[in-house]
Amino acid sequence: MRRFVLSNKKLRGVSRRLRSLKKWSESYENRFPDIQNSDYSYGYWNVKIPVHLGLVQGKQTNKDIQSFCAQTLIDAAYNIYQAKKLINTIQE
């Protein structure tokens, strides 16, 4: 949900958007893509981050919201890393 901030209107539903971002991050627990059996021709995995640009950039945001969004992305990356580690131990 990438949307550019074209106006100075207040962003509505900030707490709902932050809950949605946290839920998205938690959805990667124990989940890693199967690159060998899928059509990943370049060998990497690409995911769009479901966050409104107004949450991280612009006049409507603050440091608390930005830090929450950054921490959520770090948590998602860590969940993917743990899932890869878990898959490697199962395969061995």
Image: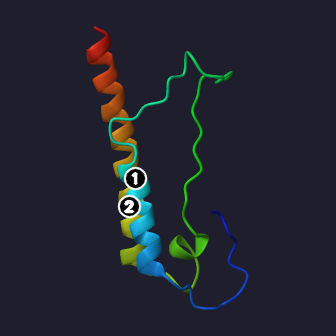
- On-image quarter of the C terminus: top left
Residue farthest to the top? 92
Q: Are marks 1 and 2 in contact (CB under 8 Å)?
A: yes
For label 1, the SS is helix
For label 2, the SS is helix
Question: Relative to 88, does residue 24 appear above or below in the rendering?
Answer: below
Q: Which mark is residue 22?
A: 2
Please state the horizontal and vertical placement of residue 20, each as a whole percent of the image.
44, 65
Please state the horizontal and vertical placement of residue 65, each as a whole percent of the image.
41, 75
Point 64% across, 24% down: residue: 40
Please state the horizontal and vertical placement of residue 89, each as a whole percent of the image.
26, 16
Question: Relative to 69, does residue 48 appear above or below in the rendering?
Answer: above
Identified by mark 2, the residue type is: Lys
Point 39% across, 43% down: residue: 28
Identified by mark 1, the residue type is: Ser
39 left or right of 70?
Answer: right
Point 55% across, 15% down: residue: 36
The quadrant where residue 91 appears? top left
57 left or right of 87?
Answer: right
Q: Which mark is residue 25?
A: 1
